[in-house]
Image (cartoon, coloured by chain):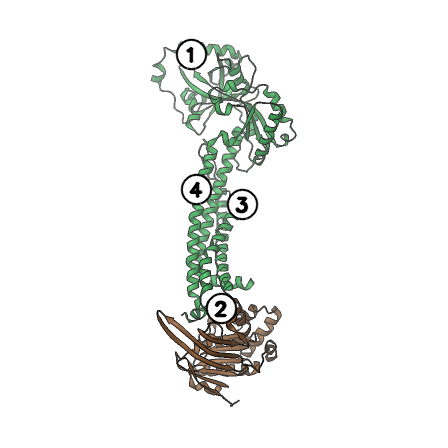
Chain colours: A green, B brown
Amino acid sequence: MKLLLKIALRNILRNRRRSLMTGSAVAAGALATLLFGGFAAYIFAGLETNNVQRIGHLTVFRAGYFLFGAGNPAAYGIDKYRDVMALIGNDPVLRPMINVMTPTQSMLGIAGNFSGENDASKTFIGVGLIPSDRDRMRRWDEFGTGATSAPDPRLSDKDETRGLIGFGLARILGLCGSLGLKGCPSIPTAAVASDKAPSAPNESLSELARRDAGATNGASMAPHIELLAATAGGAPNVVSLTVGGAEPQGVKELDDNYIAMPVALAQQLVYGRGEHKVTGIVLQLHRSEDMPAARARLATLFRANHLDLDVRDFGELTPFYGQAKRLFSAIFLFIALVMGVIVLFAVVNTMTMNVMERTNEIGTVRAMGVRRGGIRSQFIAEGFLIGAIGATAGGALAFLIAALVNHNGFTWVPPGNANPVPLHVAVSSSPLLVIAAWMGLVLIATIAALVPANNAARLSVVDALRHV
Amino acid sequence: MAQALARALAPNPASPVVRLKQVARTYRLGTIAVPALQDVSLEIPYHRFSMLIGASGSGKTTLLNLIGCIDAPTRGTLEVCGQNIAALDDDGTATFRARNIGFIFQNFSLVPVLSAYENVEYPLLLIGTSAAERRERTLAMLHAVGLTDQAAQRPNELSGGQKQRVAIARALVKGPQVVLADEPTANLDTATGASIIELMRRVQAESRTTFIFATHDPQLISHADELFLIRDGKIVEHRTETHR
């Protein structure tokens, strides 16, 4: 084996230029595969981190909510949700897995801004949450993407009337100026003045909301909007929301409709004076790999306690995650296939030329007593070595380029995101990818050498010796 | 060195080292059958410097290829070192060659990526000789052919004569029963060729290996113990020389 590898290595060095070209093809394959693979791995980690920070790993819903709840969230509230949370939180299997457990209330309604000269209203998609839990969830970063957020001072557990709205909704409701938003145009004056007549009902809604909210809001300098929604009983209800700020949502449809508010305010809007429920209980785990086990345990727990609850993971709740993952996986597979084919042909070509050039040498060593298998092994070893050297060089280059990119502070805005995030190529943190790419390329190079090696082994000794 | 080489030799001098009975070898060129050897029968005794002499195309190389077990006769029986070669499969024949036959080629045919030392050592690796013995025999063989100082040099750093010396050392290092030399001086100048013949004669005498030497040069006849004159694929004359 030592002799085999020694001769193989020296033969590779003997045709330096040819070996360099072939090795470069393998290295390019490794480079492309690892850099794109590393980038894709970072995208996956980033998407997962973003989703888990927003909606946790698992969400417990009342059965049927996932399929039908969007049309009437109020009708799918979880009864005695605090008892359910206690049941989950006290479970010895689930407790060590859970990082954050928090209730959430979804709703649909109409938001209006009737202050001053404004007279704008817009349907909204609202979510009620606990601000401190939201802050804790946004610190989750299992994969070390660095995309974490500091606690958001615009929301507080102590102020149950303050919320955030989408950047687009702020624009539509004419809050750009009062929120001091850059790049957010105000509503044209003509549009504000032209439709003054129907303002009377809106003033009534405003008054209703002010009465409900009490005196505290009157002192606030922050703008406020009125939220109208149907309660679980079907009656209209109105609350006033102090707009603490606007944050872009990445997707226009959501940006133009999004409102986040404390869960207590959301419950007040949806359930009024009735029993306050929630539409979901969000579970953020310490580690994503615990998700299947946690989900299975929750199902067992709910069955045992006769609870008509359903559990969904973030992949089901955000189809975009799965679509993006599949898209990047397909592109990665395509790149890997193309590079694999290039490597295959490059090695076949090189090894075929090697066999032709060394035909006399093959005849000599065969005459000396080397078996056909020995000749075959010799050329396969050369293919293997070219693959190994090229893949190692390409891998090293990929590590270098990834390190340069990662330390240069590049940022980008991933699809579905509103804010730029650090651009990373996760090569060093993807050992499986590195091993798989290296082994794959070496295997292709070795397999590529098989055909020329077999041809060499089948040569007649006499014919090979006659070859000039 | 001679003792070291002789250890590997266990011939039965009573029988010939090579025996051909009615051997024929026909090549096909398209639809045409070209007889290279026709009904050749001969016996070559052990420990002799035998010479096949004939013009180009007379069948010398074909006969050497058959004796060297790198080609098979179309017809007839071939025995080398008492072994019926037809009874061996491809791997068996390769192993037989590795153990019993050494080759010296006209164009030297050294492995270009190996040094002189490694080229000489190569046949010993094929027969599984221990590292210590490999080193001892390789160095002894290089010393015997006068290339101790060139041991680390690659073939492209050696002259034609030096390359052929390496080839001789490589053929002899494993202590084969038979060494086949096909026009080993054809690519060398007269003086170098003469020195190579002298060297082969000397190491043959020391190792008592059977040498079978093919040439078209009548001037080399004086070196032969056994002389086979070959013409048009047939042995037309066999002489045993008594000059030694």
Q: Check chain identity for marks 4 and 3: say if they share one.
A: yes
Q: Nearer the viewer, mark 1 or mark 2?
A: 2
Q: CA distance from mark 4 to mark 3?
A: 18 Å
The three-letter amino acid code for the residue at tag 4 is: Ile
Q: Nearer the viewer, mark 3 or mark 1?
A: 3
Q: Disc 1 marks which residue?
A: A202
Secondary structure at numbered mark 4: helix
* Residue B159 visible in this rendered orientation of the protein: no
Q: Nearer the viewer, mark 3 or mark 2?
A: 2
Q: Are marks 4 and 3 in contact (CB under 8 Å)?
A: no
Mark 2 Cα-neighbour bin, 10 Å: few <14, some 14–19, many ≥20: many
- Please report whichever mark, 1 or 2, sits nearer to the chain's N-terminal start: 1
The chain letter under disc 4 is A
- On residue B70, the disc is none
Q: Disc 2 marks which residue?
A: A366
Q: CA distance from mark 3 to mark 2?
A: 41 Å
The three-letter amino acid code for the residue at tag 1 is: Asn
The chain letter under disc 2 is A
- Please report whichever mark, 4 or 3, sits nearer to the chain's N-terminal start: 4
* Residue A316 visible in this rendered orientation of the protein: yes
Mark 4 Cα-neighbour bin, 10 Å: few <14, some 14–19, many ≥20: some
The three-letter amino acid code for the residue at tag 3 is: Leu
Q: Nearer the viewer, mark 1 or mark 4?
A: 4
Q: CA distance from mark 3 to mark 1?
A: 60 Å
- Please report whichever mark, 1 or 4, sits nearer to the chain's N-terminal start: 1
